[in-house]
Image (spheres, rainbow, N blue to C red):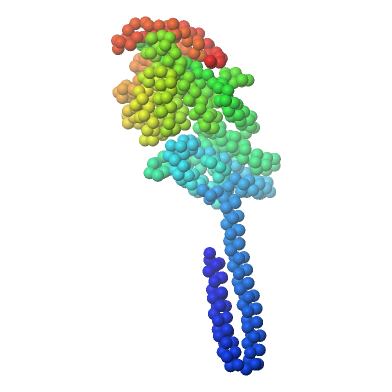
Amino acid sequence: MKQNRLAASPGAVVFSGLLATVAFLGVLYSVGEAAYRDLVFSGLTGLFATAGAGAAAIWAGWRANFTSADLARAEHDARHDKLTGLYNRSALFEELEKAAELSQANETTLGVLFLDLNRFKVINDSMGHDAGDELLRIVAGRLRASVRSFDVVARFGGDEFVVICRDLLSEKSVVAVAQQILRAFEEPVSLFGKVMTASASIGITIAKPGDPRRAEDLVRDADAVMYKAKRTRSGYAVFNDSHRLEAIERLDTERDLVQAIKEDQFMVYYQPLVNVSEKRLYGFEALVRWNHPTRGVLGPGQFLAVAEETGMIATIGERVLREACAQAAVWNHLSPDARFVKMSINIAEQQLVDANFPSLVAEILDWSGLPPEQLVLEILEDVVVDHLDGLSCLRELRALGVELAIDDFGTGQSSLSYVKQFDMVSALKIDKTFVDEMETSSSNRAIIEAVVAMAKALELRVIAEGVEDKDQVKQLLDFGVDIMQGYLFNMPVAADVIDPSSWFKTRERSPEGLKGVLVSQAFSQPASVERPKRRG
Ligand code: C2E
Ligand code: MG
Ligand code: MG
C-alpha cells in the first residue's frame, strides 16, 4: 500500500510537466510559422515517447513493489499458522533440519518438545470452537514467552505444538524448558468470562551430537512419549528406547480398536457392591472388557486411554450403557428381588459433554425397560470438579431419576467443599488407594474418618472400593462405611456367571421395607472366576 502512494506522486509531477509542455507547444503552433510547426511536431513526438517511457517505468516500479510485498506475504503465510502466528508443520521440519545441523556442528544438545493440551476436545465441544481457538492463541503466546527468542515454536496441528531448543549444553536444560512451560500453564485462563486452568502433556526427545535420527524421527519420538506423560499425568516424559515399543503397541491398539468397534468385540463384566452391615447385595458395577482376537481379554487399563485420546470412548461407552441396562432389566425379569439392586456404569467425560447424552440415557432406559432409580452413573472426581458450572446435563440426568456417584474419590482435586454445592450427587466412592492407605498410618485413617463424617453430614452415601481383606472391612464398618466393593467379595464376572436364582434370593425384609439379598451368595463365588466369555 505504502509503495502505491509513493509511486503516485512522481506520476503527478510528470503529468503536470506534460500539461505545461503541451500548453507551451500549443502557443508556438498558434504563431503559425512553418519552422515553429516542425519544431512543435518533433517536440510532441519526443514528448510522447518520453512520457510513454516514464509511465512504463513507473508502472514497472509499482508492479515490482507490489509483487515483492505480495511474495513476502505469501511466503510468510506458507510457513506460519494462521490462527496462532507460529511456524506451521512444514516450516517446523525445515527449521528442525537446520537446528540439527547447527547442533551437530557446535557439538551441542538439541531438544524437541512435543506438547499436547489435556482435554482440549472436551473444552472445544463444551465451550464452542471460538473458545477453543482463543485457548490455542493464549497457549501459543505462553509458549513463545517461555522459551528463548531463537527457539522455534510451531503449531503441529490441532492442539499439538512443537518447540525446538537448539544449542543447549545438556539434557537437563531441555527438561528445564519443559518445566518452565508447564509452570506457564499454571496461570488460570479466562475464556469468554469463564476462568479455567489449561494443562498440557509434553513428550521430550533429546539428540546428542552424532544422533542419526532425522527431523521426522525426532518429532515422532517426542510425540510417542507425550502419550506416556499424558497417561501418567506426569506433565512431561523423556523418550528412551523402551518407549519405541510402547509407541508401536499404542498404534496397534488404536488400529485394533477401530476393528473392535466394527465387530463389537466388547463385553461387560459385573462386580458386586455389598452392603456388609445389612448383609445384602447392594448393586453391581459394570466394567468393560475387550475380547481381543489375539491378545485375549483386555481390561480397561490396556485400551481405555487410547479410546479416550481417539474419541472412540463415546461409542464404547454407549455400548456398555446399553448392554448393562439391558442386563439389569433381564435380571429384573428373572427375579423380582433384582429390582432392589443398583446398576452402576462408568461414564467418560467425552460422553458427559455431549449435549445429547441425557436423551441417549432416556432412550436406553426406555428401550431396555430398566427403572431409572436402579441406574447409577459414576463420574470421576476430576470431571465433576472441572465442570461444576458447565455440566447442565447432570441436572437433566437427575431429572430422569437416575443417580450420580463420584468415582475414585480422593485421587483428584479432593475437596468436599465442592460436593456441598453439588446437590445432584448421591454417592461417593472412596478410591482403593485411600482404603489401602487406611491401614498404613493413623493420619490416613483420620483423613478417611473425616471424609466419611463430612459425606454423611451431606447425606451422601459412601462406598469403599478395592476392599481386599477383612481388617479393612472391620475398619470401614467402624468408620460407618457399609457398602463395599472389592476382590474380597468378588472379582468382576461375566453376566452368565451370575445365577439370578441364588444371587438375588430374598433373605428378609430390611427395616426400610426393602427386600435384602443374601450376601453369602456373593461370597460363594471363587475369587478367580473372571473368565473370558464372549457375550451374546
Ligand atoms: P473404577 O470405576 O474405579 O472400577 C473399579 C476398578 O477396580 C475395576 O478395575 C475393578 O476390577 C478394580 N477392583 C475392584 N476391586 C478391586 C480390588 O479389591 N483390588 C484391586 N486391585 N482392584 C479392584 P477395571 O475393571 O480394570 O477398571 C478400571 C477402570 O476403568 C474403572 O475404575 C473405570 O474408571 C474404568 N472403566 C471400566 N469400565 C468402563 C466403562 O465402561 N467406561 C468408562 N468410561 N470407564 C470404564
Ligand atoms: Mg467406577
Ligand atoms: Mg473407582
> How far across and how far down the image is residue 75, in percent?
60, 55
Is residue 47 or residue 513 the one in the foreground? 47
Residue 166 seen in the current view: no
Is residue 421 or residue 334 the one in the foreground? 334
Give the residue drawn at x 37%, y 20%.
372
> How far across and how far down the image is residue 208, in percent?
65, 41
In this rendering, is residue 219 above or below 514?
below
In the rendered picture of this protein, how many numbered marks are placed on residues? 0
Is residue 56 or residue 232 the one in the foreground? 56
Q: Quadrant of residue 437?
A: top left
In this rendering, is residue 341 above or below 71?
above
Give the residue drawn at x 58%, y 61%.
69
> How far across and how far down the image is residue 110, in percent?
62, 44
Q: Specify whether 304 is left or right of 440.
A: right
Give the residue drawn at x 63%, y 32%.
244
Residue 138 seen in the current view: yes
Give the residue drawn at x 38%, y 44%.
193
> How far across and how far down the image is residue 362, in percent?
40, 25
Is residue 149 or residue 515 the one in the foreground? 515
Q: Quadrant of residue 326?
A: top left
